[in-house]
Amino acid sequence: MSPAGRPQVSLRQVEKVFTPPGRKGASVQALGPLDLELFNGEFFAVVGPSGCGKTTLLELVAGLSVATSGDVEFEGRPIAGKILQGVGVVFQEDASFPWLTVTDNIGFGLGKLRLSAEERRDRVESALAMMGLTAFAHSYPAQLSGGMRQRVCIARTLVMQPRLILLDEPFGALDQQTRLLMGDELLNLWRKTGATVFLITHALDEAAMLADRIGVMSARPGCIIDVVETGWPKDRDSRIVQEDRFGTITARLWRSLRAESMRAIGYQGVKA
Amino acid sequence: MKPAAIWRTAFLGALVALLEVLCLTGRIDKLTMQPPHQIIIDLLRMLSAGTLNLAILKTLANSFLAFGLAMVTGTAAALVLHRLRAVRDALDPLFATYYAIPVFAFYPLLIILFGLGDTPEIFIGFMLAVVAVIVSVLSGIDRIPRVLLKTARVHQLSTWETARRVTLPCIAPYILTGAKLALAYALIGVIGAEFIMSSSGMGYEISFAYMNFDNATMYPLILLIVLASVGINMVLGRWERLLMVRRGLA
Ligand SMILES: Nc1ncnc2c1ncn2[C@@H]1O[C@H](COP(=O)(O)OP(=O)(O)OP(=O)(O)O)[C@@H](O)[C@H]1O
Ligand SMILES: [Mg+2]
């Protein structure tokens, strides 16, 4: 898919600087200046070395924090720290509510959308089924594995039917096989909902397999240093990892990232 | 029952049995204390005669009022204090030293302020209990994972909705911890106040019985207070445990 038309999300010259409270200690430039455009219905992945500002970027787009400078827009409207309807977020940490059952967790946000009881139940039930959680509908998060809890959070976001889904390393807690399957699930859901997906990951193969476009971030302060178009067909699934192109894409990502990753961990490098 | 619970019950049972033996053999004379089984008989007789029911009712009602006020005010105060960083920083050391102050020393002052009657008694119970609630609720709020609050924001909850749907349920175990303490403090405050200056209530009846060597009234009343406070505490403890188990914390 090649990006066309007006972007759904656009960031222009965005910077984020964290200033410690009371101005004690040095301030940290976490991000930018960074430009980024996301187009309706595309699957965009971001890879970058640890601590480069990926979560910071996601929180700016989500409206959870405000850029120090630059503009962030969603569907032509400035975000500026305001959470907008139509944006769903799955966080890096476990965000399930431990006092609610799986069903109540998933339905958490539905009370806000004036839906009929029937519609509400339908949405929760289909999200349970899609995430393979039907058997655990009445369990509490403490009875689930970390990966299942993450699925609860994904389901809670899905039932809101957002037009833009932001995911922050949602599969970080999963083993490799489950990651591949969850990746397939995410692709299915992306096709079914038509939503724009913005996925942060530290796994290059995950980005290469799932995304239409992949933004590569530099070490902190994070900037987009490369955007790779994968050119996969829309009906792809995890079996594309066998294709030669998959290797080519992953290799290109690694080429862009290697130096940055070394910079991020302060590694001097081996002599070439 | 877990082994620890069995040992605990056995220990308490042994203490009571020892007391029984000491009383029956005359090591503890009748003027000092009756044997435990007699206390129970006296308690049942006292309750069925009903002469002290009004006093019992008054004390329990006042204690619950003090407890309830402390729970509501303490929780609300903690929620507000958490948002007012500067005020909280200023007050924190006071909370830490609060229980070093003998609130009862101010009782005469309270009587001047509120007059004789129930108000100063409830006030003392409330004052003793409220800080325990504030301290536990604050420590609960401090431990709310930030990501849950972010989730509330993403779902566009208002401040009030966030408090009701995220903050309060999240800190429920801490509220219950506070409630267990608050209950004990409210009873101590109310009964203690009745002891010092009052003409009604269980505290007053106990001290009256004491002055008149009326062991048949004094010990059953003491036993009743112990039973009431331990009973309610156990219910709160059960509830707390249920929440902890549900969250995989126990
Ligand atoms: N609230 C904050 N206050 C101060 N510094 C912060 C804050 N949040 C993030 N930072 C700093 O900004 C930088 C980027 O953090 P961020 O969490 O966005 O990285 P990340 O790419 O998501 O890392 P990871 O891969 O480990 O999740 C880090 O150096 C971090 O220390
Ligand atoms: Mg992160």
Image (cartoon, grey):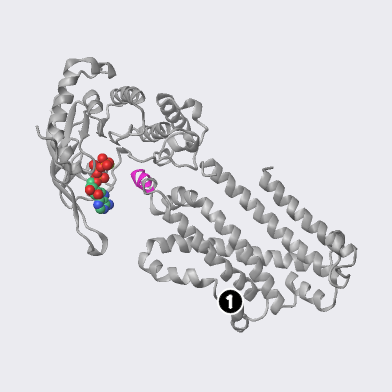
- Residue positioned most to the left: A272
Counting from the top left corner in percent of width and height, residue B167 is at 45, 51
At label 1, the amino acid type is Pro
Q: Secondary structure at mark 1?
A: loop
Taking the spot 62% from the left edge, 83% from the top edge, the residue there is B108
Q: Chain of mark 1?
A: B
Question: Which segment is the magenta one?
Answer: B149-156
Q: Quadrant of the N terminus of chain A?
A: top left
Q: Is residue A153 visible?
A: yes
What predominant SS class does the magenta segment belong to? helix
Taking the spot 63% from the left edge, 74% from the top edge, the residue there is B119
Nearer to me, A1 or B20: B20
Classify residue A29 as left or right of residue B204.
left
Q: Residues within 10 Å of mark 1 (few under 14, many from 20)?
A: few
Which quadrant would residue B177 be assigned to in this image? bottom right
Residue B112 shown in magenta: no
User: On the image, numbered disc 1 is attached to which residue?
Assistant: B102
Counting from the top left corner in percent of width and height, residue B243 is at 55, 45
Residue B151 shown in magenta: yes
Q: Is residue B36 visible?
A: no
Nearer to me, B162 or B91: B91
Up the image or down, A104 lies above or below A24; here it is above
